[in-house]
Image (spheres, grey):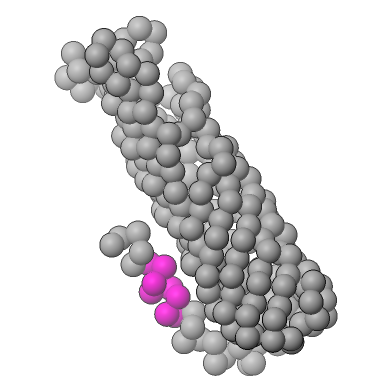
Amino acid sequence: MRRFLVPVLMSAGSITSVAALDSIPGLTGLSVTLDAIGYASQEFDVGYRSEDWSSGIRYELNVITRMESGRVQPSGGFYLFYEDRDWKGQMFQGTQERAQYECWGFGLQGGATLHLIEPGKALGLALVPYARGGLGFQDLEAQDVVIDGDRYDLSADSGRLELAAGVDLRLTVARRLEVVFGGGVDYWSGADVAVYAGTGGGGVAVGSNNTFTGTDAWVRFGLGLSF
């Protein structure tokens, strides 16, 4: 429930403000979409280990505004996101390495809308290249991670910065319904990962690592409304 509450509330707020679009100078359009993102590749590095996540999914609320008129329009907006990932590593002395990761956050994005069909038609098709940057709040819990032949637990509960670039293909039907197909890459960097002695150490803190980063290549599908 938590992962969907904020996007739903923001969607409602965005839609109720549509009536005010005409009062904003230069603003010619607004798109609000809910997107599901899957990963073609997803890697993370905690300094001691570099691995691929075993599974992961991300949900986004995207609000994009279009400025000016014509076949090429500057565009920009904001996004909210929630990520859920898991990792299953090697077996060691009968126990498997594992980790659970959640992150939610927000960011700004900017780019251009390149209309492949003349704007204003009942059916619209556009390419939207963009760059974005955001701030997230992450929660990592890893158990029985093997480091130098011993087992440790890892934990991170801190901020995260992300930078990304991508391109969307946006199909608009009847000037209102919008379907999004897209892809892109991102890099993110988080704060400290605390290291605790594993099962035999009773959870005693033994150090921390200043590196917690990741890179992703992803695809997404979304549905929404265009105004």
From where the camera sits, is residue 222 visible? yes
The N terminus - image quarter: bottom left
Q: Is residue 135 above or below residue 32?
A: above
Of 11 and 161, nearer the camera is 11
Left or right, 195 with respect to 178, comes to left
> Can residue 12 be found in the magenta stretch?
yes
Q: Is residue 128 above or below residue 123?
A: above
Residue at 40% in and 41% down: 85
Residue at 39% in and 8% down: 148
Residue furthest to the top: 149
The C terminus - image quarter: bottom right
Of 41 and 83, nearer the camera is 41
Residue at 49% in and 83% down: 15
Q: Is residue 175 above or below residue 32?
A: below
Give the percent coordinates (x, y) of residue 190: 48, 38
Give the percent coordinates (x, y) of residue 153: 29, 24
> Can residue 100 be found in the magenta stretch?
no
Start and end of the magenta stretch?
A: 6-13
From where the camera sits, is residue 113 visible? no
Q: How many numbered marks appear?
A: 0
Residue at 74% in and 87% down: 120
Rendered image quadrant of residue 216: top right
Give the percent coordinates (x, y) of residue 46: 46, 26
Task: Identify the main secondary structure in magenta.
Answer: helix
Give the percent coordinates (x, y) of residue 194: 35, 28
Of 8 and 57, nearer the camera is 57
